[in-house]
Amino acid sequence: MKNKSREIMRVQNVIDSDRLNVGKGFTDLFVEDFSKLVQDYFEIEKQPILNIAKDKNGYKVEISFYTNRVKPFNSIVD
Amino acid sequence: MAKKIVVASGKGGVGKTTVTVNLGVALSSLGLRVALVDLDFGLNNLDVVMGVENRVVFDLLDVFEGRCRLKQALVQSNDRKNLFILPSGKIDFSKHITGQNVKLLIEKMNSVFDYVIIDAPAGIDLGFHRAVSCADEALVVVTPNLTSLRDADKVVSILQSYRLDKVSLVINRARGDLIVNKKMISPTDIELLLKTNLIAILPEEDAVFLSSGTLSKKCDSYRAYRTFALNLKNGTKKLFDTTCKYSGFFGSIRRSIKKSV
Ligand SMILES: Nc1ncnc2c1ncn2[C@@H]1O[C@H](COP(=O)(O)OP(=O)(O)O)[C@@H](O)[C@H]1O
Ligand SMILES: [Mg+2]
């Protein structure tokens, strides 16, 4: 058994790191697009931070940012 | 309307051409009209694996450049009236062929065939994309080892960006004795790892390596390919069991014989 389960773990690890490997270009682009959207609703001083981590359900994607103020709704419209 | 299926793998040498040919043969023995298209330009082997290389007169390039009609380039199988191949030619002229060209050509086969099976090149370059863009469905061939599975996972994720009706997994070169001994990753494990629906398990067998075109009805691979063809035709999911031969008392004897050779 040990051979097989070790091999499966190994395949799983390699595949996981391949799937996760999206490159800096991807994350930069995503954060840039996402912060455009965020700025319609919030005032932010710093770029959002993106975190991707693997857990048993798949990849957990966390995006966090700080805001001092929610923009008044009117300002979104015009 | 022909169903157009591309056979891809990522890694080379895992059995795309072998699967294309034997699946084609199995589908044709169910009475279906089948065309096999070689889009592995330059590394074309479909004609050889089919055993018709001596009868190839024209190839895809001749059709594209107007030297012959599609009908003239199709080569009929040696022993089956309803099985044809479209050879791709010895040189890699693929730079001059666009995806649109190939797609139009394959569309022309729609009314004449029930299945068009496309042998794609290894890798994920232009040739691969060209082959996939012609298809409605994809089969991803893997062998039960790390490098093949890793490459297949990349291929599966690229295939997801195409609007294909279906992407299914074909496990080739499965060894029942090693699976029973827990030395080889099992088909169920592979299906879970790649999160892709499994449509066929094909055993590793000398008969496959040695055959050109037709497998003897006595060998396991013949039955495995027949089950595979029926799954495709009927949308079922029956899988050939490579391990039953190696389970139980007689199975353990077979296993130890296999180990000692
Ligand atoms: N199930 C199998 N059992 C034994 N040999 C196989 C099997 N599948 C493929 N082969 C052999 O492996 C080699 C590579 O197969 P091929 O179909 O040419 O791969 P690809 O088209 O993916 O490059 C060939 O010599 C073929 O006969
Ligand atoms: Mg090949």
Image (cartoon, coloured by chain):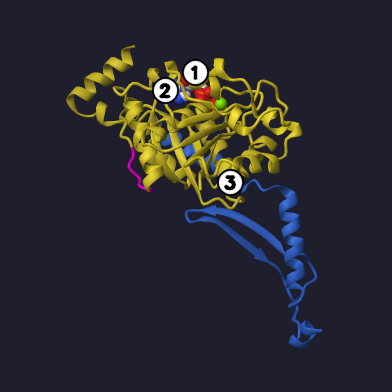
Towards the viewer: B69 or B50: B69
Which residue position is annotated with label 3?
B159
Label 2 sits on a secondary structure element that is loop
Which residue position is annotated with label 1?
B51
Label 3 sits on a secondary structure element that is helix
Chain letter for the blue colouring in the rendering: A
Find residue A73 and report its horizontal and vertical position in percent.
74, 86
Q: Colour of chain B?
A: yellow
Label 1 sits on a secondary structure element that is loop
| Mark in front: 3 vs 2 | 2
Q: How many marks?
A: 3
Question: In the image, what residue occupies the spot 65% across and 27% down?
Answer: B41
- Look at label 2 and name its amino acid: Asp
Question: In the image, what residue occupies the spot 60% across and 60% down?
Answer: A61
User: Is residue B35 at all visible to an observer of this figure?
Assistant: yes
Q: CA distance from mark 3 to mark 1?
A: 31 Å
Q: On residue B195, which mark appears?
A: none
**Which quadrant of the render holds ligand 2?**
top right
- Look at label 3 and name its amino acid: Leu
Among numbered discs 2 and 1, the one appearing first in the sequence: 1
Q: Which residues are magenta?
A: B235-239
Q: Is mark 3 within 8 Å of ligand 1?
A: no
Image quadrant containing the C terminus of chain B: top left
Which of the 4 image quadrants contains residue B253?
top left
